[in-house]
Image: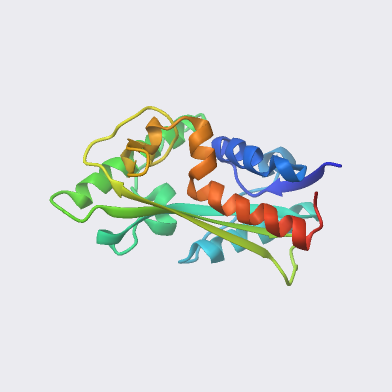
Amino acid sequence: MTFRLVLASNNRKKLVELQALLGATGVELVPQPALGVSEAEEPHHTFLENALAKARHAAQAVGGPALADDSGLCVDALGGAPGVASAHYAAIDLPPGDREAQRALQDAANNRLLLERLQGTADRRARFVSTLVAVRSADDPEPLVATGRWEASILETPRGAGGFGYDPLVWIDAWGRSVAELDAGVKNAHSHRALAARQMVQLLREAWRLA
């Protein structure tokens, strides 16, 4: 039986990734815009706090279970930045229009700023971090929490045309490629979101008794 779970995100690419990763549990993710749910505020300093805030917001709006992901890139030489500010690291004015086009402009600006701040820095160690939180209701006292970390380093120039966000700048030693050069199957099997999703699948099966 299919279990519907509201995804507290407006990011279409994140929806596709998570649906593929959670499909084995029989979960059907419904993006919050399809239900008229607004984006939640993300005022916190940690992925966990922001993911929980987004999940509770969506659950409150629909009166049912919700799943949220808060993720980003943490760079050692920058004290963990961009961190929770990864999606809007560069402060730019976006023109009105298609959301995906706006996201592409923001991604490009974020990547430029990251390279500027790392210019001349030898320590390029970094990691992608993803924290997933699932709640049965807005006041669920026992949220399910899963976190994945994908160790990497930051390139000096972009490589690859796949993925989104910082993917062209993030180099994975184990594959000898940037994330943007990996095919979707490899990324979905090994990424920070994949690691978190595998933990979440186990939690959904154990705590919520999903198949």
Percent of width and height locating residue 85: 41, 55
Q: Which of 66 and 132 is in front in this view?
A: 132
**What is the x, y in percent for residue 209?**
82, 57
Does residue 139 lie above or below 55 as drawn? Answer: below
- Name the residue: 27% across, 46% down: 113
- Corner quadrant of residue 138: bottom right
Taking the view exactly as shown, the residue that stands out farthest to the top is 161
Q: Taking the image as drawn, is residue 182 in sight?
A: yes
Q: The N terminus appears in which quarter of the rendering? A: top right
Q: Is residue 166 left or right of residue 31?
A: left
In percent of width and height, residue 199 lies at: 62, 56
- The single residue placed furthest to the left in the displayed view is 120
- Asked if residue 87 lies left or right of residue 207, the reply is left
Which residue is nearer to you in this view: 139 or 69? 69
- How many marks overall? 0
The residue sitting at the front extreme is 174
* Color scheme of the displayed model: rainbow
Residue at position x 67%, y 40% in the image: 33
Residue farthest to the right, as pictured:
1
Residue at image position (49%, 50%) is 192
Q: Where is residue 94 in the image (x, y as percent from the top left)?
A: 40, 38
Q: Is residue 29 visible?
A: no
Residue shown at 38%/31% (left/top)? Answer: 181
Relative depth, front residue between 120 and 205: 205
